[in-house]
Image: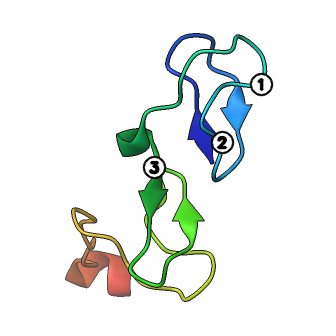
Amino acid sequence: MVECKDCSNDALSGDNFCRTCGNEIEEHDVHTCDCGVVVHENDQFCHSCGAEFEGVEEVEETEEEQG
C-alpha cells in the first residue's frame, strides 16, 4: 500500500495522484517485491511469494529460551 506524503491517505497501486488531496504520488513511494507485487514499506515478508526483505534481523534463541 502506498501512502500520500501530504495527507497520509492510502493510495492504490498504480495511482499517480492522491484520491483525497490530489497531490502527485511519487514513484519512489511505491515499494515492490522482486516478484512484482506492491508491498508496504514496513513489511518484512512478501504477502504473495513469502520472500524476506533485506534489513530484517533474525533473532536467535539463547540456550535459556530453548529450554
Q: Are marks 2 and 1 in contact (CB under 8 Å)?
A: yes
How far apart in space, not on screen, are marks 3 and 1 (Cα)? Answer: 22 Å
How far apart in space, not on screen, are marks 3 and 2 (Cα)? Answer: 20 Å
Percent x, y for residue 1? 63, 48
How far apart in space, not on screen, are marks 2 and 1 (Cα)? Answer: 8 Å
Which element carries disc 2, helix, strand or loop? Answer: loop
Which element carries disc 1, helix, strand or loop? Answer: loop
Q: Amino acid at mark 2?
A: Asp
Give the number of the disc on residue 27.
none
Q: Residues within 10 Å of mark 1 (few under 14, many from 20)?
A: some
Percent x, y for residue 59? 27, 71
Q: Residues within 10 Å of mark 2 (few under 14, many from 20)?
A: some
- Report whether 65 appears left or right of 16: left
- The mark that comes first in sequence, 3 or 2, is 2
Which element carries disc 3, helix, strand or loop? Answer: loop
Quadrant of residue 29 in the image? top left
Q: Amino acid at mark 3?
A: Asn
Question: Is residue 17 or residue 34 the one in the foreground?
Answer: 17
Q: Which residue is mark 1?
A: 19
Give the number of the disc on residue 42.
3
Q: Amino acid at mark 1?
A: Arg
